Image: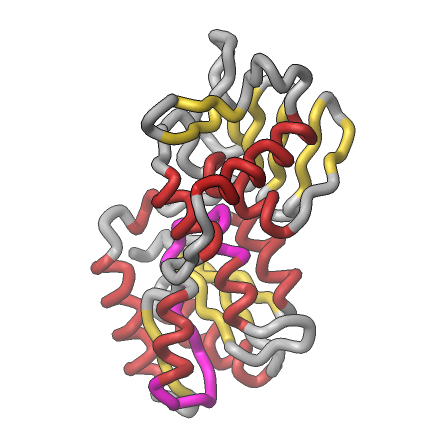
Amino acid sequence: MSQIQVLVVDDEPRYLKLLRYNLEQSGYQVVTAATGEEAIKAAATGNPGLVLLDLRLPDMDGYEVCRRLREFSTAPIIMVTARAEVVDKVRGLKVGADDYVTKPFSPDELLARVETVLRRSRFPSEAHAVSRLTIGELAIDFVRRAVTVEGNEIILTPVEYRLLHCLATNFGRVMTPGEIQKRVWGSGYQEYYEGLRAHIHRLRQKIEKDLERPTYIITKHGVGYMLAHNTTQPAKTDSEGEL
């Protein structure tokens, strides 16, 4: 595990110094960030193998950072915070955290949790960030949450972006209406299927050239929807390989 890069996110200099020292002494490479935006940019460009994420940051809380990271990164995330309530731990796990450590903690406890989370991860050395997906003339920047078509930025509502993100992270796979509704609106979503169709239609109006013959959001009648492209050119990402 000596080659693994750890991103440490905390706005308290003394904790950053302490965590950096102990991790580097154990052979890890360390990158630090003091704000949520710095953390998101560092994760997108540095591709860390693990993230130690403080819950309280000056620009956004750790839950929001975790949600944003999970939009493009598979790196394990350990929440580091002074809060010890079970509800906070559960909330962190629900937004994508892999473990939780409460301040104050001993260096041995922290390192043990880091090693355990990395060992639990199926392919810790292959954790990767896919920060951008390009399909034909459609480009999705997961870090900036920006969508462009033929180089022109498209303004999406939060729901439209979540819907497109859901389809994009399952590129080439048909998703049932139930799957989409659960991922975009949550398990308690009760809207009729017609509601989803309306959102799909509005999203198509913004990204498709021809609504009668859509080239990106494809309907598989009787099954569901998928994000694809009607050319032989594969989707490309700015990480290595193809989706």
With 148 as the anchor, is 187 left or right in this view? left
The one of 189 and 123 positioned closer to us in this rendering: 189
The one of 135 and 52 positioned closer to us in this rendering: 135
Q: For the point 46% across and 76% down, which residue is it? A: 19
Quarter of the figure with residue 49: bottom left
Going by the picture, which residue comes out furthest to the right? 152
Q: Which residues are magenta?
A: 68-86
Please state the total of marks drawn on the protein image.
0
Residue 197 lies within the magenta run: no
Residue 4 sits above or below residue 209 on the image:
below
In percent of width and height, residue 60 lies at 63, 71
Quarter of the figure with residue 97: bottom left
Q: For the point 51% across and 70% down, which residue is it? A: 63
Q: For the point 50% across and 22% down, which residue is it? A: 235
In percent of width and height, residue 105 lies at 37, 88
In percent of width and height, residue 163 lies at 53, 43
With 67 as the anchor, is 149 left or right in this view? right
Q: Could one spot residue 179 in this view of the protein?
A: yes
Q: For the point 22% across and 59% down, which residue is it? A: 119
